[in-house]
Image: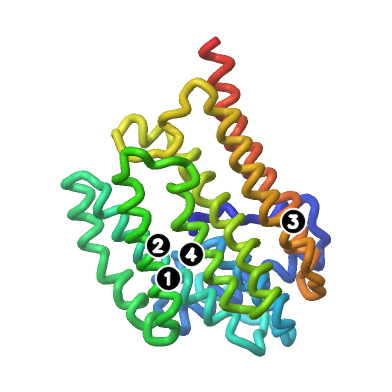
Amino acid sequence: MFGYIKIYKNELLVREYEAYKSVYCGLCKKIGKDYSFISRMLLSYDCTFYAVFLMSLKRSCSGFYTGRCRFNPFKKCSYCECGGDALSKAAAVNVILAYYKLLDDISDSGFFKRIVLKIIKPFFSRPRKKACKKFPEIDRLAKEMLNAQQKTEKNPDCTLDMAAHPTAEFLASLLESEGCGNDGRIYRRIGYGLGRFIYLADAADDYEKDIKSGSFNPFKPYGDNLAEIINNNLSSSLAMAYDAYNLLNLVDFKGIIDNVILKGLPTVQSEISEKFEVKNEKSV
């Protein structure tokens, strides 16, 4: 995941923001405990949301406590206590995705950058092996996502839907595994919409860089109507996730999840769309 599933702080209640920070710090601590101190630097907002969502589904948050920050011992942080495996799963997803993202970067990079990435690869592979032992299914899904993504991007007839499918399918399968029957289908729909949004937002963000480097980008064929295409596809992805989310009856952390879906993600979409709208105005 790439850090697009974020809160919109200005619209959060103070107690909701403090709870969100507690989950963030709790996940940071869990990553350090289960994997390594360095792995903490891989912590993403996406995996924090994943932890919040899982704890809301299972109602597994058992309280909060105060402790010293491992990065800054002079600072006190609030940590979330989890009675289930939400933090453990989110920590595993974080290090596993970081590893496969590194592999993808190695395959797409030039000679010198590839050498640097290979040098730091052991710092990613060791945590991933630990996570794989605990949650082999998550590792399997991530590996399948990377293989499918690389295969899809080599297809000369690749469309936006085809390009976004591997990431969307990964998150859909990840959330679907948390439920069964109708609940599982709802979780899957939410995951697919969010995964599609993440991939397309990242592709739009990297558009200029990919054009210069000649790397694959699914938006390349849509140069004339790029702003409209990006905005429409991000909107449809959010609508898919939101329609399914409305079928849930969450209690714990509902204000935070509402904020992310109704405020945070639309804000990310607006920031991305504005860059292309400004570009079109200048070209005119």
Are the two marked residues, 1 and 2, in contact with CB atoms closer than 8 angstroms? Answer: yes
Q: Amino acid at mark 4?
A: Phe
The answer to whether residue 77 is seen in the rendering is no
Compare marks 1 and 3 and give the one earlier in the sequence: 1
Say whether residue 152 is left or right of residue 271: left
Compare marks 2 and 3 and give the one earlier in the sequence: 2
Q: Amino acid at mark 1?
A: Leu
Label 3, label 4: how far apart the Cα atoms are: 19 Å
Label 2, label 4: how far apart the Cα atoms are: 6 Å
Please, is residue 146 above or below residue 181 in the view?
above
Q: Which mark is residue 141?
A: 1
Determine crowd level at label 3: few under 14, some 14-19, many 20+ residues with C-alpha closer than 10 A.
some
Q: Amino acid at mark 3?
A: Asp
**147 or 270: nearer the eye?**
147
Determine crowd level at label 1: few under 14, some 14-19, many 20+ residues with C-alpha closer than 10 A.
some
Compare marks 1 and 4 and give the one earlier in the sequence: 1
Residue 20 at x, y = what percent?
70, 67
Residue topped by disc 4: 170
The answer to whether residue 28 is seen in the rendering is yes
Compare marks 3 and 4 and give the one earlier in the sequence: 4
Residue 232 at x, y = what percent?
63, 36
Label 1, label 4: how far apart the Cα atoms are: 6 Å
- At mark 4, the secondary structure is helix
Residue topped by disc 2: 145
Are the two marked residues, 2 and 3, in contact with CB atoms closer than 8 angstroms? Answer: no
Residue topped by disc 3: 243
Are the two marked residues, 2 and 4, in contact with CB atoms closer than 8 angstroms? Answer: yes
Residue drawn 29% across the image and 60% down it: 103
